[in-house]
Image: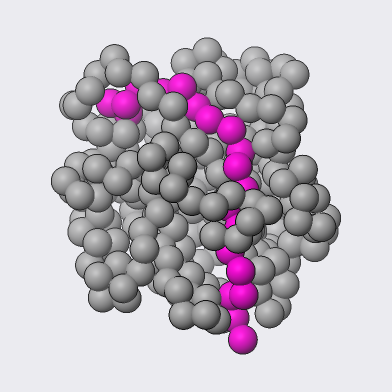
Amino acid sequence: MGVEKIFILPGGFLDIDRSIFLSAMDMGQIIKAPVYSILLQTSEGPILIDTGLNPDGVKDPEHAWGARARLVPPKMTAADDVRQRLQELGLAMTDIRMVILTHLHWDHTGTLRFFRHCPIVVQREEHRFAFNPDPFLAAPYMANHLDAGLQYQFVDGDCQVAPGVSLIKTPGHTPGHQSVAVSTDAGARHIFAGDAAPLMVNLRGKIPLSNTYSARQCVDSLHRLDHLAQMLQARIHPSHDLEAYQSLNKSPLPL
């Protein structure tokens, strides 16, 4: 037994310049980018992939997100708090047995402080960089999201972390980015790309992000994801693509 059900937990939206996701393209075109977490119901207990935006930003955006509250304005309601989304599924925060982070940017780590009881699985290289980033890439890593007495569990490269749940190292956007491959007991296969492929057009055109640690690694990871999806006959889910997001069932309905 492995992954029984998958739930997409809505977490709000970002108003963001499309060119951030697409190198040297569509500059000045503001798009609505979804933010969401993924809940895996497994035979060993619930696993959460990414933790969304900081819910403190609903009432005090500047305190929660600093300058990014104005540069990349989040649109979030109290219902988008991951605690509320889990409660809708009859789960408490302490029911989560593991959190997997695709990477440690602010829009994926906003509620980490509520998960001190369980392992936080992240690539070792990502954790190292997040706590000592190059200055020109430091802004998306927020100390108030990360430094909370967490039980980080480091991995190095690809590995299986639970039956039906595997990590795929996909660096580029960040040094230690990882995507997550999920196989359900019913035979469905999914790859949650994270920001290795924020938009479907990144994948189709092998277009790197502008906001990237290494454009070369970003393109290599896009090729890798495409190849794995074909080999595994898996559906790829980009992280911030509105059209792809709108096509998905949202919690409390399973994917």
Furthest toward the bottom, the residue is 1
- Visible in this render: residue 139? no
Q: Is residue 47 within the magenta segment?
A: no
Residue 110, picture quadrant: top right
Q: Which residue appears at 56% of the width and 24% of the height?
A: 74
Residue 81 versus residue 158 in the image, above or below: above
Q: Position of residue 87 (x, y in %)?
A: 80, 50
Q: Position of residue 213 (x, y in %)?
A: 32, 40
> Quick check: 208 left or right of 161?
left
Q: Is residue 5 within the magenta segment?
A: yes
> Quick check: 53 left or right of 115?
left
Indicate the quadrant containing the N terminus: top left, top right, bottom left or bottom right. Answer: bottom right
Q: Nearer the viewer, residue 80 or 212?
A: 80
> Quick check: 91 left or right of 253?
right
- Visible in this render: residue 7? yes
The range drawn in magenta is 1-20
